Image (cartoon, helix red, strand yellow):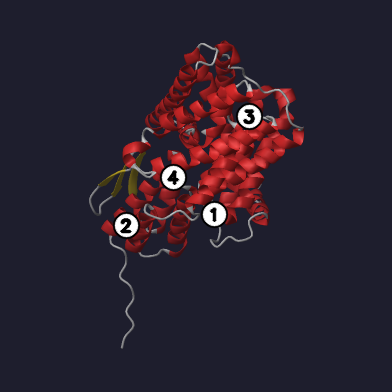
Amino acid sequence: MTEQTPAPATRPDVTDMLTEAAAAMVSSTYPAPQAEEVLRGLAAAYDADAEIVLLPTLVLTETKKHGVPQMRSVKTSYRFDQMTQVQSVMAQARHNKEDAHDVAESLRAIATKKPIYPSWLRVVGYALSALGFGAAFRMDLPSLGAITVMGAVIGVLVLNMSRSPRFAALLPLVATFIAGVMVAGISIALDKPDPVRMVAMLVVVLLPGASLTSAIIELVSGYMISGAARLIYAVMILGSMAFGGALAISISRIPANRLEDLTSTMTPEWAAWAGAILYGIGTFLYFCTPTRLWLPSLFVLVLSFAVSVFTLPALGVALSAGLATAVGLIISWAINARLGGGPGDLAIFLPTFWLIVPGSTGFVAMTGEIESAHNLSDVAGTAALTFFAMAIGMMLATAVYPLLSKIAPDTQLIMRNGAGLILNTVKIKPGK
């Protein structure tokens, strides 16, 4: 019997593979510049001269001189375990040049992949993220206990509503309204001010961090249509959440003078650091971060948090957040280079973004405007400056990271090996 070699992938198969890869990148909320770079590398591995267009809800692919153009509508959003599996499949395809049809099927199957953690553990993670975020604001123990219990309740609601496409669009509004009603009751019962910020702690993982991150990277990179669309979507989500919170506060009839921007010290300073770690662990559980990424993700989160804390007295809120963002992105890219490239850096970086960059500040500021509470709406000025500083930090990271390898040829290798010291269970060999 003669051994038969597999037939080479046909161009329609390659086009289908690139279409599935592009759709997976969009579902991972990956910025268009980085997604195109990864997809170009995948196309080059299969000797395909491809044209790819990426939009937030649509992808267009065409393999020149072969096959027909393909268009795919994208309406899904991936968890972190799905993001990292996309990376794994695409990296193996690039390095091993596996059959294009099999790669396409593997990417297509990721959309229906079950979460790696059970629902009850994800609810625990949601409650931990609320507790950690509250501890990062150094709130007192009764408030932290109340936030943890309410976080578990909101976590159950979020998980159940997110499974239904019919109610998923209403999730930010409904979850924020219910959180606001509960917080208003606790605020009145315990005589606690600052109920708006407590609401933000309960819904922080619903804030559009991925969309804001990708939007800013795309806008500063010249991808105006995609970046503007993501930014408008993020602002609409923030607006609906602010409306839900304001509606709950109005129904509860809490006076505007109780809507304080309370950030005074109530617990020791170490509680903020412990809170940052708890918050990270909670987001890992809720968004199903694979355990092999916990250590590098915590490393990036704590390092960026430290940069923001220690530079705050000298640089102020906005610039310290921008610098922390740049540091977090550069380290995430270095770790992701060790992984082989792909959507992994976004899964590593997003928990840091939610903690450092005040998406919650934007929510608090918009709620203050609706409620005419000037001590909250004044936060909007700081939020705007911080978002600009964040954009500058991302531009700096985008410019500095590739420049390092050009100035010193060994820098890229050093960064990859250094990242490998905190990532010991990598199964994919780094790209050369």
Q: Which residue is denoted by mark 3 in the rendering?
A: 321
Q: Nearer the viewer, mark 2 or mark 3?
A: 3
Is the C-beta separation of discs 1 and 4 under 8 Å?
Answer: no
Q: Earlier in the sequence, mark 2 or mark 3?
A: 2
Residue appearing at x 58%, y 14% in the figure? 378
Mark 3 to mark 1 CA distance (whole Å)? 27 Å
Q: Nearer the viewer, mark 4 or mark 2?
A: 4
Report the amino acid beneath label 4: Ser
Mark 1 to mark 4 CA distance (whole Å)? 15 Å
Is the C-beta separation of discs 4 and 3 under 8 Å?
Answer: no
Q: Earlier in the sequence, mark 1 or mark 2?
A: 2
Helix or strand or loop: what does disc 1 sit on?
Answer: loop
Helix or strand or loop: what does disc 2 sit on?
Answer: helix
Report the amino acid beneath label 2: Val
Q: Which residue is denoted by mark 1 in the rendering?
A: 290
Q: Earlier in the sequence, mark 1 or mark 4?
A: 4
Q: Nearer the viewer, mark 3 or mark 1?
A: 1
Q: Residue furthest bottom?
A: 1
Residue nearest the observer in this picture, 22 or 300? 300
Q: Which residue is denoted by mark 4 in the rendering?
A: 28
**Residue 12: image tag:** none
Q: Nearer the viewer, mark 1 or mark 4?
A: 1
Q: Residue furthest left?
A: 68
Q: In the shown orientation, is residue 65 left or right of residue 420?
A: left
Residue 356 seen in the current view: yes
Residue nearest the observer in this picture, 25 or 82? 82
Report the amino acid beneath label 3: Ala
Report the amino acid beneath label 1: Pro
Q: Which residue is denoted by mark 2 in the rendering?
A: 14
